[in-house]
Image (cartoon, helix red, strand yellow):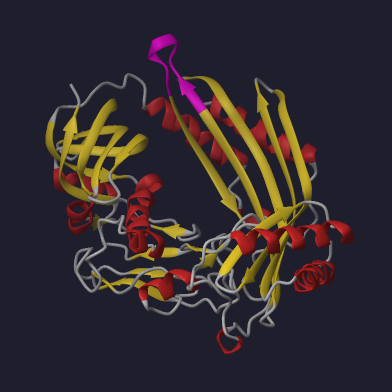
Amino acid sequence: MTDTSLATLAEAMLDAARKAGAEAADALVVDGTSLSIGVMNGALEQADRAEGIEIGLRVMVGPRQASVSASDTRAETLAEMAERAVTMARLAPEDPTIGLADPEQLSEVRDGAGLDMLDPTDDPDPAALEDAALRAEAAALAIEGVSQVQSANAGYSRRRIHLAASNGFSGGYGRSDFGLSCVAITGEGLGMERDYFGDGRNHAADLMTPEEIGRIAGERAVARAGARKPKTGAYPVIYDERISSGLIGHLLAATNGSAIVRGASWARDLLGEQVLPAGLDLVEEPHRPRTSGSRPFDAEGLPTKRRAIVENGMLTGWTLDLATGRKLGLPSTGNASRGTGGPPSPSVGNVTLTQGDQGLQDMMAEIGTGLLITSLIGSSINATTGDYSRGASGFWIEGGEIAYPVNECTVAGNLRDMLLSIRPANDARTHLSRVVPSLLVEGMTLAGA
């Protein structure tokens, strides 16, 4: 559907809500197409295509709200949706913090112009995606020591969204995503080890070549041959750049307004306190071009803007939508996010952590002995206390150099202490939504051999 058609459909949903008795409402329309191709042993393994439209309607009757969704856009379906939603809202519990934004709060930006998230070229042909996956697989198999390729996948998606509300907001934008990945295996039987590499971009022209992706996946897998358990004890740990954003993700989750409202966050008493080392900033950048986490406005029609979540190591504020902000007596930070099936909730898109001045090799040389983590599995994290324990694999460091690959170990600590001790390297990939370099964490407990 065209942008105009999406806007017309959203307005039709609002009209149906008014006729059904809603006092306020907002409507979300998502029109998307996706295609995924997988190959194995030089032949097509799977091909999945999905396309369609999803619609969501949220209605408010006094201090009560309800949400409904569908994939049928006929007028009679819209009327039935609206009537059902209003009936549900009248039976819902009261919540004085729900409600749309005031008109003067709304974003003046109503489209994605300038964000460059939508590739203007034609959708890729399935045969071209298959060829890319086959080339990645061949490149991985060409690496000496690779015994097989578990999977090589290429895909794309393209979607347009439009949000409209009874407070006068109406806006939409589009985004495309292209991806290519490869998982390679070395060894046989119980001695098998695997690793991967992939790339994802808004524009197909920005993707790394299939040969690069396959080669890196193969080299990573071969480097893991002969993995064994590391030593047990307290050692410095480096979170490799490919997984380090997960550590910062725990901080973002702990400072999300929903967790703060519930009292289920280890950071609930840390507003204005130091949560990262001095000199480090964690900045949200919603207007970064060609980045998947960018958005011109949030899911309540509020303007998005650059925001320092952490400044000079100090926590400056929570991540809020309208409802969580009202519960805390604070304004929204323009971070509402939603799908078609429910009300908004706060979330963070693009973030950037201050990079350091050391490369990964220099950081390993400095610590002498420790663990470089390249993969994490499982999770035992207490969101209220911050106690942290995860299965890990990677490489043992001796004399400042990689000594041997490791697996089947556990790393443990407390997120509060871990984040206060981090030291960033300078190797973050700046095109990612979360720009986080490799992170050194001192004094973690390792359970290995």
Tell me which corner region of the image, top left, top right, bottom left or bottom right, holds residue 419.
bottom left
Depth order, front residue of 152/215: 152
Does 21 sit left or right of 259 as displayed?
A: right
In the rendered view of the protein, which quadrant contains the N terminus? bottom right
Pinpoint residue 123: horizontal percent, then vertical percent.
78, 51
Highlighted magenta segment, given as a residue range: 184-193
Quadrant (top left/top right/bottom left/bottom right) for the C terminus: top left
Can residue 283 be seen?
yes
Q: Can residue 118 be seen from the camera position used here?
A: no
User: How far across and how far down the image is residue 236, in percent?
Assistant: 16, 43
Q: Quadrant of residue 80?
A: bottom right
Identity of the residue furthest to the front in this view: 91
Vertical comparison of 189 with 357: above or below: above
Q: Can you give x and y, in whole percent of width and height, for residue 75 in the image?
A: 88, 61
Check the image and report above or below for 155 versus 143: below
Q: Nearer the viewer, residue 191 or 338?
A: 338
Relative horizontal placement of residue 399, taking residue 190 as reference (left or right)? left
> Can you name the residue that lies furthest to the bottom here?
104
Would residue 192 be counted in the magenta stretch? yes
Residue under the point 56% across and 24% down = 149
